[in-house]
Amino acid sequence: MELTGLSFIGTQRGSRDGASFQAFAPQTGDPLQPVFRSATPQELDHAARLAAEAVASYSQTSGKTRGAFLRHIADGFESHRDVLAQRAHLETALPMPRLTGEVTRTANQLRMFAGVVEEGSWVQARIDPALPDRAPLPRPDIRSMLRALGPVAVFGASNFPLAFSVGGGDTASALAAGCPVIVKAHPAHPGTSELAAAIINESVIAHDLHPGVFSMLFDSGVAIGTALVKHPLIRAVAFTGSLRGGRAIMDLTAARPDPIPCFTEMSSGNPVFILPGALRKGPAALAQSLFGSFTLGAGQFCTKPGIVFLAEAPQSLAFRDELKSFVEQAHPFTLLTSGIASEYHRATDARATQVSLTVEPHLSSEDQNGSEPFHAQATLFTTTLDQLLRQPDLADEIFGPETLLVRCGSTQDYLQAARALAGHLTATVLGDEDDLAANRELIHILEQKAGRVIFNGFPTGVEVTHAMVHGGPYPSTSDPRFTSVGSLAIYRFARPVCFQNFPQTMLPPELQDENPLAISRLRDGKPE
Amino acid sequence: MELTGLSFIGTQRGSRDGASFQAFAPQTGDPLQPVFRSATPQELDHAARLAAEAVASYSQTSGKTRGAFLRHIADGFESHRDVLAQRAHLETALPMPRLTGEVTRTANQLRMFAGVVEEGSWVQARIDPALPDRAPLPRPDIRSMLRALGPVAVFGASNFPLAFSVGGGDTASALAAGCPVIVKAHPAHPGTSELAAAIINESVIAHDLHPGVFSMLFDSGVAIGTALVKHPLIRAVAFTGSLRGGRAIMDLTAARPDPIPCFTEMSSGNPVFILPGALRKGPAALAQSLFGSFTLGAGQFCTKPGIVFLAEAPQSLAFRDELKSFVEQAHPFTLLTSGIASEYHRATDARATQVSLTVEPHLSSEDQNGSEPFHAQATLFTTTLDQLLRQPDLADEIFGPETLLVRCGSTQDYLQAARALAGHLTATVLGDEDDLAANRELIHILEQKAGRVIFNGFPTGVEVTHAMVHGGPYPSTSDPRFTSVGSLAIYRFARPVCFQNFPQTMLPPELQDENPLAISRLRDGKPE
């Protein structure tokens, strides 16, 4: 697979007319070959028209057809595991084992959605049969099921160059739902993006699908992404990234002449509450696990624990000292982009003027901004609950290997702390089962603040399963009713359509009386 | 039940401090007693705080508790059927049989949602059990289910003073989901609103629920509604009304510091496509049914057929003549408010300058705006497909007894017409089964344009069932993934919450291993 640096406009390649840009190796800051070309507005429009054309045939394909297509893509990812991981390693400096694992995760995500649509019950078929003898008026036959929304714009994320990028969870769930996809590739890993797009493109061709089912656009700036979100033929948007970027996309979709569904996954502090039982099990082990979690992937996970509530307890001081020592001994981390690194330095410098900086950074400002522009030191801040309540922006996410320890008088203060939280992807409680039982009210508050409540685990592990929720109230996402991880993610891209009084032969198979697909359905609200 | 003219702030009555207003009898234009008082901003804030306080207990009530509460409200509506219908008749001039039927519908809606939450499977419980032996890492136990969003703001609609107002479908589905509700009553039927609120309030007290579970605010203008949508403690909004009002609410929710879920049901032309078989069955009967549908409730239904596509065919001229004759012979209609009537006159006058007015109105402009300000004549416009394609605003909804006949050369033109449609609540095809089979492509296009596709029926009948979809792409609603009628409407007000690694005793019953509620669940993605 040779990199060309060009977009995919359906199954064709884009031109060399757009602005050029390159990826950078975060380890050295050096530019990487080849040169990439931004898509032009004409190419974007062409991709959108192709996608709209593809809706008629693609949205009506069977679950089996889409399942086979997704499995073909998954096989393509796995058979190009090394080349994908190597290029991603060059572009992101994430470790090779993590990246080869991310290929597997990406393939598994695709196969999970394949399984969902092959089985078919996800469409939530409902049948309310006619009641011809009902008085005063007969009831007509009413049947409904989910149908694809139409062309979806997907924005690749910087921090998962495979699993949340071109062929990642957003693309997989949108394609599974029957929606054509146009990906705006993240400019930090364009080579990985091109490889992934080539794999998907090959599957589109192999399965003889309409060429508009998949396009991928490069852009070094925001012009193409903005135009994509505003394009009249786009029917939904999915984005994973910063609060600033995500909110900008939300605002663009809301300001359209015809606002469209938009799911942005943006910013989360992932609060952790430490209860006495967790400290009794040993402060050193707890500190090590927490350090591991907030520095995993250089702290660039959506679910990084960025706020840790610690009540006064016999071993809380020992825990703080252990945590401090892990941070002090940590080697510098390499961040994904120079932009992320400089924002990390800006944000940690700003926070250091507001709260105690528990560990002085090893790197001087000159090192940070000069010879090693992508590097960053782990940072541990400490504050009090009172100060946090007075300055709620201390809870704002800092993307990178940083966390904020919030000292509380007692675990009773956790209720006040929890009530003051904004929306988060996760909330974690560490302790023993007696702690948990004694803190039911805390759990009930956290349920309202987060998409996932974790007991005795760390939030950075996000399983791709049927029950997973990777979502939560704003600002963690744009809409708390959806998730971007797990099989529920497909529901972002489908809408119910009702067929009234249709003859059997004109109904989709999902709604025909004989239930040829043998899916789970509701008849008059009850399982058949 | 004595009317006081005061809001309900939880279980207390509002003050007399706000601006006063009165309802008007549409038949005569005379003001009705008593005088009503707008809620004050302080009262709104109090209601919102009460609602937020109520979340902790109300959102954790069992489905059985909420079901009993909803059934109590339903019984209250039915036991006050006459007083509700009589007051609604005074305030809306809708016929008594329609209004007593609307009481039944309202009660049935409440009982349908009671049934849904009593049965319990609506929460979509999913269990992915722990895999302690999985390599390279064990999988934790992951379980998820739907939980209430929090306080919901509901805007009563003008055209269904009971079924889409204070105790209507939005309130019923939000209360069923476990959300406290604050209704902004429609100022055109404040007496009906107060009666309905008193019934709900009585049920809150009878079931010993937190007083913040339900409030109802009066306002003659838009200040309280605007402040309600912007209030930081409100977590979702539901609205039924005009495109202008609905879009204003969408824009307000999108501009919040923390945007929240918003479902507005706004504007729909409900296109009808007439195929040859429908004309062969008899043009007179078809014309009569269509006339009945577009003038039902004085044409003030969300699902009024406002655009009718008619291809040249042997009997199409006869059909047009029959329809014209029904319109000519129609008595004037009484509209709900003077605002709706004057907007109807403005919009029909404007359209008359653009297209042919098939029937001259009986009423002079003076009559319309003078002595009988709420009255309006049925109006039939005719245009051609070419003109409609050049002037898409001809498809804009006119609220009232009006429809637009669009002449097409042949049924082949219907494909182009359908592709040019914006989003609608419904799309209807009239013909025989051979027509339907010959027009599969038309059906596939209409599926993408509407929430409900009807064969040989009229869209004005909206059944309240499990399979009903009363939704559709913008501008018919703000989000095509939801519906405001039918049991699916509950999903507007709930979000998935995931519990990771929780001990059995700390899980909600819906997620406990032994399944004490005996609900349908997915285990590892498969029905248990």
Image: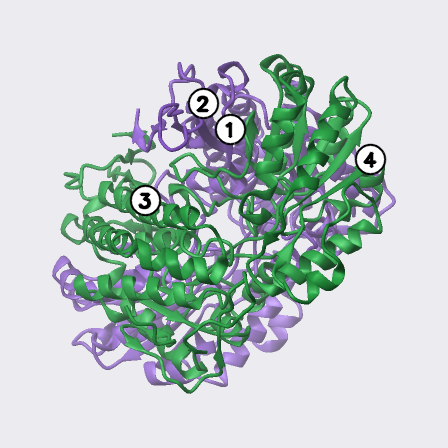
Chain colours: A purple, B green
Q: Nearer the viewer, residue B52 or B418?
A: B418
Residue B250's mark?
none
Which is in the foreground here, disc 3 or disc 1?
3
- Residue B390 % position (x, y): 85, 42
Q: Which residue is mark 4?
A: B384
Q: Are marks 4 and 3 on the same chain?
A: yes
Q: Could you say which quadrant of the image residue B121 lies in?
A: top left
Secondary structure at badge 2 equals helix
What residue appears at the point 29 percent right and 62 percent down from the top-left corner? B200
What is the three-letter code of the residue carrying label 4?
Thr
- Residue A389 % position (x, y): 38, 81
Rendered position, A106 above or below A91: above
Spatial CA span between label 4 and label 2: 36 Å
> How many C-alpha atoms fall within 10 Å of the one at disc 2: few (<14), some, or many (≥20)?
many
**Which chain is home to disc 3?**
B
Q: Which residue is mark 1?
A: A499
Secondary structure at badge 1 equals strand
Q: Are marks 4 and 2 on the same chain?
A: no
Q: Are marks 1 and 4 on the same chain?
A: no
Asked whether the beta carbons under mark 4 and mark 3 sit within 8 Å of each other, the answer is no
Spatial CA span between label 3 and label 1: 22 Å
Q: Which residue is mark 3?
A: B108
Nearest to N terminus: mark 4 or mark 3: 3
Residue B107 in sight in this render: yes
